[in-house]
Image: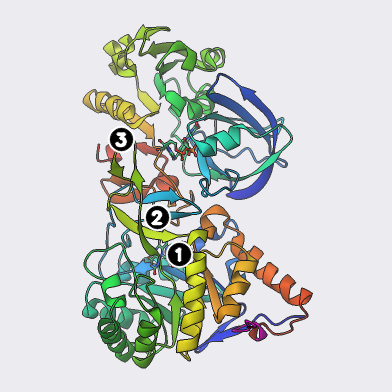
Amino acid sequence: MVDLAVKIDKLNLKNPVMTASGTCGFGEEFSDFIDLNRLGGFIVKGTTLNPRQGNPYPRMAETASGMLNAVGLQNGGVEHFIHDIYPRICDYKTNILVNVSGSTVEDYVRVAEKLNDLEHIPGIELNISCPNVKEGGMAFGTSCTSAETVVNAVRKAYNKTLVVKLSPNVTDITEIARAVEAAGADSVSLINTLLGMAINAEKRRPVLSTVTGGLSGPCVKAIALRMVWQVSKAVKIPIIGLGGIMNASDAIEFLLAGATAIQVGTANFIDPQITIKIIDGIEDYMIRHNIKDIRELIGGLQM
Amino acid sequence: MRKTIKDLVLLRNIRLNPDNHLLIFKVPGFDSDIKPGQFANIEAKYSTSTFLRRPFSIHNIDPENETIHFLIKRVGEGTRHITDLKEGESVSVVFPLGHGFTLPERDEKVLLIGGGCGVAPLMMLARAIRPYSEDIHILLGARSAKDLVELDEYSQMGELHITTEDGTAGEKGFVTQHSIFKNVSEFNRIYTCGPEPMMKAVAGIAMKNNIWCEVSLENMMACGFGVCLCCVTETKEGNKSVCTHGPVFNVNDLKW
Ligand SMILES: Cc1cc2nc3c(=O)[nH]c(=O)nc-3n(C[C@H](O)[C@H](O)[C@H](O)COP(=O)(O)OP(=O)(O)OC[C@H]3O[C@@H](n4cnc5c(N)ncnc54)[C@H](O)[C@@H]3O)c2cc1C
Ligand SMILES: Cc1cc2nc3c(=O)[nH]c(=O)nc-3n(C[C@H](O)[C@H](O)[C@H](O)COP(=O)(O)O)c2cc1C
Ligand code: FES
């Protein structure tokens, strides 16, 4: 028997595999394909104070080994989540985190306050890194002062596990990581999507309605891995690593680089059962390498 | 039927013309609860330029032989990979996805309109309608006679009408210029699938004549099962995912 359990602040994860916000809906969409209770956790899609229609179609462009999206945080708003979604999903036996977005500090705080009271939501992931909405999101995550301000404010209003999701669209991600740690984050997750662009040469037009969008998939893995490794040297709080994870070997690489848990995003679109295959694959790897406790792998890179 | 992901073996790969292939896959333990208009998301042999799956309407099913059929047009690298598959090879398929067409009431007069590869879902739809109505008209449009496929099969399903842009088969012109539209108000229902400008023109005629009309949209998709929110279309109730709320929509629900 191998032990796959990990801890992120007060959260006990039966294994380090979670699904990434915006790529797993509210979890229930996967119920035909997998037993959600096997996951370490899942992060429901970006939730804002008020409902948002998101950006106009087209919102997606396939790229070499990845994709660009410009969904723009389409969601029904936090009240819709609390009244219509939460009752349907609260009985899953896994950690359900809500990804929180906003355009003002006040927005973030009010959403966090409302979620604080939900018994079966043990934590939130603060999205200060969405590249797809004009007025906010990423702006908070690209400067230390604004990141600190928003995390500080939310920390005062929210007393469960606070994960802060970092943007890779910065010069030095370790500075931001240190700033949010100092402001009271319990954990950081990285990376959100990289700002990118696609052009249709035949039509001489941008592919996305918003011109630019967020790049994800295996094409970003090398960058994500590097950032997780750098951040793991810079902060003491646990790291949740993501970006381009397609299989168990990718997941193990993130653990070795210093992540305590990982999230699977875009890979879910191609194989809705991929998370289960990754959990099983990590277990196989541990048996093969005679590793009893997954914590031996975390930050276990040998130099 | 529950959505499943399965590796399906390709039994037949029939090249109907240089661009269009009929692919027949074996589905062991076939569950025939698949509705006309539903689709499948097929893996396009992973390469750097074909990363995502490709969506295709379910063209036909054969529960007795446990097969599922697709009509696929080669337009790019993904469809080339898929139509180059050899008989006996297998490929990962997620199906059935989305909501299908609404079937007519008994003895209603229906018109099925397909353009380009939009003809694909109409075969299964026509077969499903036949027990209810003998009065099925199928109007197919293409650029040229050589682009039309499976005309014999469609003519067995109902009265067949054809338009080609170059006049090499049927009436010359666009689908919506066909003479059948002179008496369009005789129809109780119109179903259509094809290029968006064609569907919009058909929808316009239907709305003007107050005819019930469903269209099957082909928005670009990433996941196909409602989690990415990339495939949305504007409806009167806001943006809705085509892969789960559609791909079939009543035109009155769209902002067309
Ligand atoms: C619900 C649904 C049902 C469909 N049913 C069928 C069918 O039964 N038979 C069939 O041949 N095709 C069908 N399509 C279209 C098919 O999915 C695309 O032709 C295919 O994804 C193109 O892949 P590719 O890699 O060959 O082309 P790419 O190299 O990706 O693109 C080539 C060209 O095809 C266009 N294209 C790409 N993806 C789509 C798409 N999702 N919809 C429309 N155009 C696209 C691109 O704009 C480009 O001009 C359907 C699409 C949807 C969404
Ligand atoms: C379609 C789509 C929607 C996304 N929506 C969100 C979101 O609402 N909030 C968020 O924090 N990240 C969002 N992301 C980013 C992912 O959670 C993840 O950080 C990113 O895709 C990198 O991981 P991946 O390469 O495994 O997909 C989205 C990504 C995609 C592809
Ligand atoms: S394709 Fe992902 S929601 Fe429709």
Q: Position of residue A227 (x, y in %)?
A: 46, 76
Q: Amino acid at mark 2?
A: Leu
Q: Which residue appears at 46% of the width and 27% of the height?
A: B117
Nearer to us: label 1 or label 2: 2
Say if disc 1 is inside 8 Å of ligand 2. Answer: no
Q: Is residue A104 above or below residue B45?
A: below
One can see residue B62 in this view? no
Q: Is residue A51 above or below residue B155?
A: below
Residue that badge 2 annotates: A68
Does B11 appear in magenta?
no
How crowded is the residue under tag 2: few (<14 C-alpha within 10 Å), some, or many (20+)?
many
For residue B33, which quarter of the picture? top right
Q: Amino acid at mark 1?
A: Phe
**Dominant SS in magenta:** loop
Residue that badge 1 annotates: A26
Q: Position of residue A243 (x, y in %)?
A: 49, 67
How crowded is the residue under tag 3: few (<14 C-alpha within 10 Å), some, or many (20+)?
many
Q: Which residues are magenta?
A: A296-302
Foreground of the two, B242 or B197: B197
For residue A200, which quarter of the picture? top left
> Which mark sits nearer the N-terminus, 1 or 2?
1
Secondary structure of the residue carrying tag 3 is helix
For residue B85, which quarter of the picture? top right
Disc sitting over residue B251 in the figure: 3
Does A297 appear in magenta?
yes
Nearer to us: label 3 or label 2: 2
